[in-house]
Image (cartoon, rainbow, N blue to C red):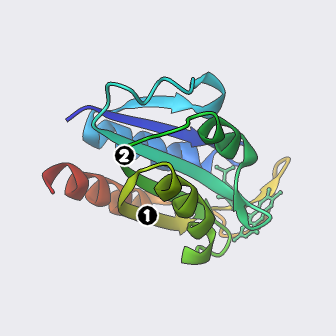
């Protein structure tokens, strides 16, 4: 199975750690949203979209990219890291993807150390090895299923 993961991570690089753990497990192509082009998903069987949660949302760069894609009839999974992981943060992204024709086949979230510029105000040390192991398990489940 051909997997592409597109992600945005900037404050503590937490989502990047999760994205890398998933990509290694699935042998996926990994792209930062800044490197991704709207035509990239063509040719992949499964697409992963991942982000840190910023002011209640997936990063706007992911929305900007996806809005340039008129139709995307693909299996997709979404994942996020957040100060307080909650399924409500996944909802608008899932709705956008479904509106493009995607089928959501999984979602993953875990805590991420929250902070900026070397200062951490919560979840210090996350994602930790246990969080990353959960991410690998999730990824394995997707390719088996
Ligand atoms: C500007 C900013 C806004 C944030 N807003 C939220 C939020 O609304 N809800 C939440 O649970 N976490 C929030 N967080 C915490 C981040 O979601 C968390 O640290 C995440 O792991 C960051 O991912 P990254 O290191 O990949 O950028 C915020 C962090 C920053 C820097």
Is residue 126 among the parts visible in the rendering? no
Secondary structure found at label 2:
helix
Splitting the image into four quadrants, where does ligand 1 fall?
bottom right
Q: Residue furthest left?
A: 144
Q: Nearer the viewer, mark 2 or mark 1?
A: 1
Q: Above or below — where is 47 with respect to 35?
A: below
Task: Decide if ligand 1 comes within 8 Å of the CB at mark 1.
Answer: no
Residue 120's disc is none
- Residue 47 in the image, given as x and y percentages of width and height: 39, 42
Pointer 1: residues within 10 angstroms few (<14), some, or many (20+)? some
Q: Is residue 76 above or below residue 126?
A: above
Tell whether 82 sits left or right of 22.
Answer: right
Looking at the picture, tell me which residue is in the foreground, 110 or 120: 110
| Residue at (49% x, 66% y) in the render | 109
The structure residue drawn at horizontal position 27% and vertical position 33%, both measured from the top left corner, is: 27
Label 1 residue SS: strand
State which quadrant residue 107 falls in: bottom left
Residues tagged 2 and 1 counted as in contact (Cβ below 8 A): yes
Q: Position of residue 45 (x, y in %)?
A: 27, 37
- Local crowd at mark 2 within 10 Å, few (<14), some, or many (≥20)? many
Q: Which residue is mark 2?
A: 22
The quarter holding residue 13 reads top right
Q: Which residue is mark 1?
A: 108
Name the residue at 30% across, 60% down.
Answer: 138
Label 2 to label 1: alpha-carbon separation: 11 Å
**x, y percent for residue 96:** 57, 56
Question: Which quadrant, please, contains the C terminus?
Answer: bottom left
């Amino acid at each position: 199975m051909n997997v592409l993961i597109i992600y945005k991570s900037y404050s503590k690089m937490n989502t990047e750690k999760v994205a890398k753990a998933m990509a290694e497990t699935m042998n996926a192509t990994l792209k930062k949203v800044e490197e991704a082009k709207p035509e990239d998903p063509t040719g992949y069987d499964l697409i992963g979209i991942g982000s840190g949660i910023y002011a209640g949302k997936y990063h706007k760069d992911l929305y900007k990219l996806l809005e340039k894609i008129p139709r995307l009839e693909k299996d997709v999974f979404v994942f996020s890291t957040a100060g307080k992981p909650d399924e409500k943060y996944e909802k608008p992204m899932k709705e956008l993807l479904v509106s493009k024709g995607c089928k959501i086949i999984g979602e993953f979230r875990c805590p991420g150390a929250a902070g900026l510029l070397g200062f951490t105000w919560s979840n210090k040390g996350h994602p930790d090895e246990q969080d990353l192991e959960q991410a690998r398990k999730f990824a394995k489940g997707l390719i088996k299923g």
